[in-house]
Amino acid sequence: MAQPGSALAWGARGRRFESFHTDQTQKGLKRRCAFQPFFHFAMALCSNRRALIHSAGVLLNTQDLAGLSLAAFDQIVASTSGFRTRPGQREMAQRIAASLHDVSLGEHANPHRAVAVIQAGTGVGKSAAYLSTTVSLALQRKTRVVISTATVALQEQLMTKDLPALAAVLNTPFVFALAKGRARYVCKLKLERLAGSQGEEGSDMFGVDEDAAPTTAAYAKQLKGKDWQDPEERRMALYDSLANALASGQWDGDRDSLAEQPDPRDWSTVAAERHSCTARHCPRFRDCSYYNARTQLAQAQVIVANHDLVLASLGMKALPELDNCLIVFDEGHHLPAVALDQFSGSMDLSGFRWLDKLPRLLHEVAEKMGFVLAQDVTTLAQQLKTALLDAGRITMDLLRDVTATYDVVHRFKDGVLPEVLSDPMTLIQGHARGLSDALEALGAELKLRAKEDPPQAASCSVLYAKLGPMAPKLSSVVRTSAMLLAHDEQPMAKWLKSDTSSGLVALSAHACPIVPGALLNEHVWSQVRGAVVTSASLTSCGSFDFFLGETGLDVVAHVSTLAVDSPFDYRNQGELVVVETQADPRQVEAYTREMVTALIADLQDVRRGALVLFTSRAQMKSAVEALSGVLLERVLVQGQMARARLLGSHMARVESGQPSVIFGMQSFGEGLDLPGALCETVFIAKLPFSPPSDPVEEARAEWLKREGRDPFSELVVPATGIKLLQWTGRAIRTENDLARVICYDKRLLSTAYGRRMLQGLPPYAVSRRVRGQILAVPGFAA
Ligand code: SF4
């Protein structure tokens, strides 16, 4: 795949600028750790798999380590009141201990590796199983554990519930911390300069992004009551108040700890982005919020992060190196999508005000330093702008040929850039590289002067911060144009997009690799020594094959798989009803009409909580428009209010004895925990196939076809099977729940692929509803 362009050397790799944060509440734990050491294990003495570990004069072999880590799990189960032994959970703990106890960490000529892929059904208690074993192993081996998740909800659960619970019962004290992207922290240097500027240089000082999307509607509403006439005055008042709070110690510089979240545009100007930071050469380095958080993180034995951060930090030494720690990827089913996103590129073809500013800035900074730029940056910027305008004009023409609407995605067949875009893209690539070389040289000079001449460090750091916002813009142009021009054996998905959601027509060009497994293999599994990959939904249609292929683990030698069943009695606690409509679900209009009529009738019977999952916004809109009478009061629709508020309203209604129904789409189909009365019925409007317009999915299907393979069977069915497993998983959340899933898509029973998906679901009692009559399904009856 295309490598990032030279502009990336300015700060890091494109938009992957991230940082860390240690949970302040863990200070007490840190003290315990310092004064009450329990285990005193030294480093492994040799690289052999039978390596001996020295502990306070006692030699332990690796089997002892496996036993100790399993004992830690048993200790937790025994010490937690109300906790019942679950066979599946112990099986999971056993597998982790057996897999990871003898992996080689650090420098090894021929390291032993292990990846345990474990699907743990709902209710298994997977976090206790992996935390107890991996943390215990890591403490014994004097190494660290990174727990990577996909959602904030799971991070919160780990940080506020699971890890404190583990710390309370484990004999060995340990420190745990949450790693966050560095843009969550304020840059003290920039904030102080802006707060003190009284608007002299104002927004121009650190480059307000004039091409960025306008202020969000929510923030605009928040500002309304504050009577600001001048946006600049408002921004300066914000920076003044943040600077005061930081200086007085009332605020720690973490954006998440602010009572009111600032507008993203205002915040981005003062964020501690890597590309605007001279790090140890900065005069504020010693009391920088970000670096303080990072120092605290370095002292933690357990780090909670997210998949984006783990992938973005590869090779940057911001998190423990993958070959020198244990890592758990929880919610591991997100890994393929995160990998594609991390290695994709996009380029704006309609907002170029930054390009007018860039040469001015370069000249101004170079002049202040007495530095001679090797490039004619004024001409290069003008040439780049002209080439981008050309590409934008051609894009408009191409899109106009495809459709008359303005919101459109146009993918290039077989990943081949049309001839007409080749020349402008080659010019864009050349000019952007020239500018990026100039920016990089100037940045390197600023850092050098800051290092060699400490009295100049402050002014050099400010100048560096001024240039910084240009780096990611240039790097995305360099990177994306390189990807669009590339002709690899395995094609990339390449597409143009026009979008009017901001009120103006925004044009952009995109490129994305299509095989996530190859990326993960190259960047992650080749490094990893000991990992657990887990989730409640890793198998599809009853097999791990699809997941292993998607993550590239199918070609890794040291992988084991285990599916641990949920402790729930699905056949007696749950029921899956497949409604047989007259219309074929592929006839969109007729099917939606019939499905909505059936759904509205079924909703009349909801007595407590229910969830309806739709596959598209249009489908959900049709159902909303069909609501009338009492149903209008009962239904809460995704997007009508913030998710937390919507869920809060739902809970309040159900708890007060009223019926309440949530209408949602894919993001409500996973991770939503509505136990008991909060969700007694899950309605599935249609089998959750990916929208046919997704350019990456389309490109993959096209490539597989060309290779003589069957994308529907290899890709579409297993991907839909995983989603269906997640969607149906919203129904039964505890051992006491009784719930129904009603699916209006008859293909689940009437087609071979539907039956394949059904085989991969928990063993619900399955029945058909035909013209109002419930009929048993042989082989699936209660
Ligand atoms: S070290 Fe200085 S420039 Fe870097 S983020 Fe901290 S305050 Fe800003």
Image (cartoon, grey):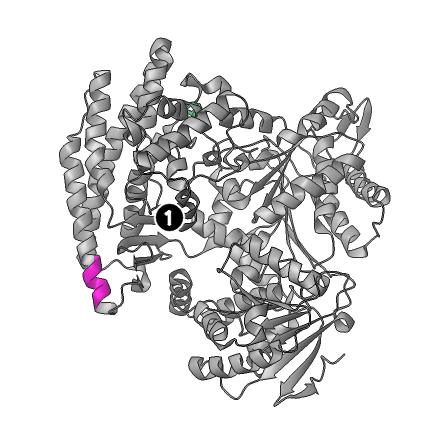
Residue 480 seen in the figure: yes
- Residue 94 position within the rendered picture, expressed as x and y whole percent measured from the top left: 77, 48
**Residue 500 drawn above or below residue 437:** below
Q: Indicate yes or no whether the magenta region holds residue 771.
A: no
Residue depicted at 68% across the width and 40% down the height: 160
Q: Main secondary structure of the magenta part?
A: helix
- Residue 304 position within the rendered picture, expressed as x and y whole percent measured from the top left: 61, 39
Residue depicted at 33% across the width and 32% down the height: 233
Label 1 is placed on what type of residue? Met
Q: Could you say which quadrant of the image residue 60 lies in?
A: top right
- Quadrant into which the C terminus falls: bottom right
Residue 745 seen in the figure: no
Residue depicted at 46% across the width and 71% down the height: 621
Residue tagged 1: 1
- Highlighted magenta segment, given as a residue range: 395-400
Question: How many neighbours does mark 1 have within 10 angstroms: few (below 14), some (14-19), or many (20 or more)?
Answer: some
Residue depicted at 44% across the width and 52% down the height: 340
Q: How many marks?
A: 1
Residue toward you, 420 or 652? 652
